[in-house]
Image (cartoon, rainbow, N blue to C red):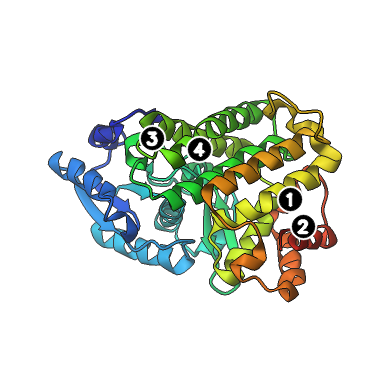
Amino acid sequence: MIFGPGCLQRLPELVRELGGTHVLLVTDPGLAKAGHPQRALQYLREADIAVAFFDQVRENPTASQVENGVEFAREHQIDLILAVGGGSSMDCAKGINFLLSNGGKMEDYKGFGKAHKPMYPSIGVPTTTGTGSEAQCYALITDESTHLKMACGDKKAAFRIAILDPEVTVSQPRTITAITGIDAVAHALESMVCKRATPISQVFSQASWHQLNTHFETCLSNPNNLQARAGMQLGAHYAGVAIEHAMLGITHSCANPLTAHYGIVHGIAIGILLPHVLRFNGETHGHLYTPLVQNFDRAYPSPAHQLADRVEELVHCMELPFRLRDCGVSETILPVLAEEANEQWTARFNPRDVNETDLLSLYQKAW
């Protein structure tokens, strides 16, 4: 992990370190205004490194987008993959790597460890402070037939190098800062208490929460504060490391069906659901959150309830929706959402066991 203001300029040196001569740059067209992919392109071309520019990534990348990227990469005979963007760009880049190096279709890699051939070296440059995808070996790719996300993981798919340049994140609009940041908060809190948490993953979960909780509001009120941007970027990355060594919980399993059915932005769904999940888990497993609360207020039933209030405070600062009904969600679809949320892999790792009835109750409270 390379971290520091201006470190994007080291890109040519790092590409050469990995033996790259023909780079596939994967990004989304929305970043053109900020100019970050163009800067990366310029640095590489000035260093006489060939670049094929693929900017056809959309939010929640699909298998067909990945296949388009693979075809484009084959045409240009690339030997290294570079992702510049948010989680969607990085997920798409990993998906391209799976198919380009190992063949087949995206669904062949659903699960973990199904890539049996070596994969291309890759570099991730996050331009948002949320997903932590640059620290993870999983690609989340949407299956167009079911609208569900396929988690395709393999240690070989992880970026060899992650470049964290806080200057790159300053251009984030306030809304993007909010919806990606609250996703990182959920990553920190859920990875801390999930069933696969370890002492090592919890070190990163705690470090993540400390950075995010300290710097989030400053980023919203003073977006040009580079120290706060750096703190948020580290927080998101640490949470990504925690997920890589642990897992998530029902906040994410409940958020994904909302995106699939209504197109609700992932971070908005997370912000609505997370406080309810914290209180639900806090009824039986509240003690697991204790290391995240430096000064526990005994007026709360558990540390989880205190964290839930803090998350609601952050969501209020972001001026994001508080209820599902405000996002156009119909009350009649809640049982369907609960059924689908129960099928999501992250639900199995929640610290408190859940079933469809529990998930329906959470949706109803969030509605």
Q: What is the spatial separation of the Cα atoms under label 3 and label 2, in whole angstroms?
A: 36 Å
**In the picture, residue 297 is in which quadrant?**
top right
Q: Which mark is residue 362?
A: 2
At label 4, counting other C-alpha atoms closer than 10 Å, the crowd grade (few under 14, some 14-19, many 20 or more) is some
At label 3, counting other C-alpha atoms closer than 10 Å, the crowd grade (few under 14, some 14-19, many 20 or more) is many
Residue 268 percent coordinates (x, y): 56, 56
Q: Which residue is mark 3?
A: 164
Q: Which residue is mark 1?
A: 276
Task: Say what amino acid the circle numbered 1 marks.
Answer: His
Task: Say what amino acid the circle numbered 2 marks.
Answer: Leu
Q: Which of disc 1 and disc 2 is earlier in sequence? A: 1
Residue at image point 24% right, 34% down: 9
Tag 2 and tag 1, C-beta contact below 8 Å: yes
Q: Which of disc 4 and disc 2 is earlier in sequence? A: 4
Position of residue 263 in the picture relative to residue 338 (left or right): left
Q: Which residue is mark 4?
A: 217
Q: Which of disc 3 and disc 1 is earlier in sequence? A: 3
Q: Secondary structure at mark 4?
A: helix
Q: Secondary structure at mark 3?
A: strand
